[in-house]
Structures are given as structure tokens and as C-alpha cells.
Amino acid sequence: MSIVVLGVNHKSAPIDVIERVAITGEAMTKALHGIVTRDNVRETVVLSTCNRTEVYVVAEKFHGAFADVRDFFCEQSGLSVDELLPHFYSQHDDAAVTHLFEVASGLDSAVLGETEILGQVKDAWEIARTEATARTSLNLLFRHALEVGKRARNETSISKSTASVSHAAVEMATDILGSLSDRRVLVIGAGDMGAGIARALANAGSRSVTVMNRSRERAELLATTVGATVSHINELDAALAQADVVLTCTGSGEAIISISQVQNAQSIRKNAPLLIVDIAVPRDVEHAVGEVAGVTLRDLHDLRDWAQAGIDARQQEAEEVRRIVGEEVERFNQEVKSRQAAPLVAELHERAESIRRAEIDRYAARLAALTPEQREAVEAMSKSVVAKLLHSPSVQLKNNAGTPQGERIAAALRDLFEIE
């Protein structure tokens, strides 16, 4: 049994592929159950962000799981196998564990050390736990990954300076325009990314910020915290005609800003310069908008290229985080091994003993007429039956600790006896 990660990310694929495989909103629950019910998958967690869609699985057979998850990606995206495979990667066992720890630490992000990914990893795990697609093995792995991400940020400066995609988007816009202080800025989306953008704008000294969202209540809550005004998404056309800068990051799943809308806005603005930064996946803005006179359109690929300078400047911190990741992979492996043998054997016997005692208590009325000697014989016999039943799995678990077979036995026993 192996831990395997398979997916597509900003390093392996262009943004049009990333947005086709993205899983958003209510589709996540369906995706989790669609994967875990496949023949070779025992557990699964799906991590889908603006930079990646990755499927983590516990698999009986690597090649079978690879085919199962590959087929899921093709069904999800509408891509053929030949179209997907050039961008599709997989890693297993220690390499998969290392990959997740690096993701949680911000090493694998477009913006090195960004902090948003740690919350996204936590959210992905919590959804999988709620849906019961993450159990013993992946619960242990993701719990450890969150610890690694926190340790990396506490012990190094990896998250100093530009520490989030939303922060980087504001910095890139500032770099392009020189300053945002006198610009009219429109932020579309009041989720986590939108909140990050709004906070970054406030820190950058932007004095004219409008927050737009489908939920006015959520937009008002965000606007209050950063001193912005509020607008509803229905007022988008008018807002485009008034803005100098648009930063958009909704989870709509499709373009909300069309070329015709921008053309109309620019005709009103007499083609005055308009900067649009789209960090949504799938993208919020039609690609052709960048061809409209006066419009500069930037997306996640542009942001990634812009952020490279920051990555180069923080390579020393990155190396220190990689050292931490290496230590934590070894610690994780030791924890896996330790959970396979003695503690699990003890928990198994304790669980069996609690069942034995409950059954004795259930039949207490029928046993009341027994003499002390007869009662003692019943106790001895029931204990002997439990011990003999557990002898073989206990021996197998101890003899195979630290091996793939041991992992398989341990996971099965935990699931069967409901031991966390």
C-alpha cells in the first residue's frame, strides 16, 4: 500500500489546462466520492487551488491508482489522455510525502513561501475527513503536513516580504503603475483571495477601493475592515467604466468579464489606461480582453514570472525549509512505523476487551445464577477466545512493521476496529 500524489500544477501545465482540471465549490464532494470508489483507491484528499489540482490517494497498486486518477482527470476536464499526460505528474511513498510537505511549506508555490496554501491544504483535508474519504493514513499525513508548514514559517523567513498570491498581485500592479495611491481600484470577489487583495491595497496606501461581490453582506463585511466601498456584481459594467485597476479573484468557474463589456467601458473612458489582474482559476476575464485598446491584462502566468525575482532572492531560506522538510519526512516515517506495531496491538486488544466486557454485561442476568467458580470459567474462556482471535493479526503486525505489508495490515485493522 502506497501514498501517491497525482496532478497538474503551475510548473507542469499552462493556465488553460489548470483551469480545466480545477474543482470548485460543491463539485469537490462529488469528486472525492468519484475517486475513492475506484478499484485501486483506498483513501483520497483533493487539493485544488489557483495553481494546482492534486489528488492524494492511499493505493493498493500504484499503476492501478495512476490509471484511476488519470481517468478521473480526463473526465473532469474533457481532456484526452494524450492531451493530459504531458502535464500530468505522479509521485509515491517518500517522494509523495516530501511533495506535500513542500506544498504546505510554500516551496512549490508560484510565489515562494506564500501563506494562503497552508489554509488551502487544511481545508482540503477537512472536506475529505467530513466526507470520510480521508481515514487513518491520510489523516496522519495531512496532520503532519500542517505541522511542517507551520514549522517552516516559524523557523525561517520563507514567508517574509511577498507572502501570498493576493499580496503579489497588488505588488505587481504597483510595479506596473508606479503607485496605486491615486488610482480607482475595483476588487471583484470577497473570498479569502479578495480579502487578501483588499488588505494588501490598504497597506499599499490605496485611497479609492471598491469591493464587488455577489453577496453584498460579505462584501460589506470586508469593505468595513479595509475602509472600502461596496458594489454588487450587477453593477459591473458601470464599475469597469470608472476603474483604473481591476483585481479579480472569484470562484465563479467561468469568465465574468467579457471583451464586449470592456470595449463598452473603454469607449466611455476614451481608451484611458486600464490594468486588469486576473488571479482566478478558472479565469474571470476573457483572454481577448487584453487586445482592447488601452487595456493591460495580466493573469497567474504573468504573476509567476514577475514573482521569480523574489524566488531568486529567497533561495537561501528555501534551502533551509528543504532541510526541515527532509527531517520531517524522516519523522513521519518513524511515526508511521511506530503506529503499526506496539501501540496498535495494545489498542486492538483494548478494543476487543471492551467488546468482551460489554457482552458479559449484556448477559449479566442470565449469568447471575452461576457459582463464583463457573463465573470465573466464563471469564477465562471469553478472554481466551479473544486472545486467540487476535494472536495472528498481532504477530503479523509486529513482524511486518516498517514494510508496505505492515502498512496495509495496520490500516486495515484501524479501519475494521474503528481505531484512530
Image: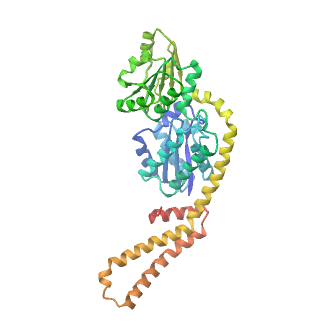
Which of the two residues, 89 or 310, is positioned nearer the viewer here?
Answer: 310
What count of labels does the image hold?
Answer: 0
Q: Is residue 37 visible?
A: no
Q: How is the image coloured?
A: rainbow
Which of the two residues, 300 or 62, is positioned nearer the viewer here?
Answer: 300
- Residue 373: percent from the left, percent from the top? 39, 91
- Residue 324: percent from the left, percent from the top? 65, 48
Q: Which residue occupies 44% across, 44% down?
A: 31
Q: Is residue 24 visible?
A: yes
Tell me where residue 268 sits by quadrant: top left
Q: Work out whether 113 lies above or below 243.
A: below
Q: Work out whether 84 lies above or below 258.
A: below
Which of the two residues, 99 or 64, is positioned nearer the viewer here?
Answer: 99
Q: Which residue occupies 41% across, 76% down?
A: 356
- Residue 172: percent from the left, percent from the top? 57, 25
Q: Work out whether 50 lies above or below 61.
A: above
Q: Work out whether 127 lies above or below 13.
A: below
Tell me where residue 26 sits by quadrant: top left
* Quarter in which the N terminus is drawn: bottom right
On the picture, is 264 further left or further right than 13? Answer: left
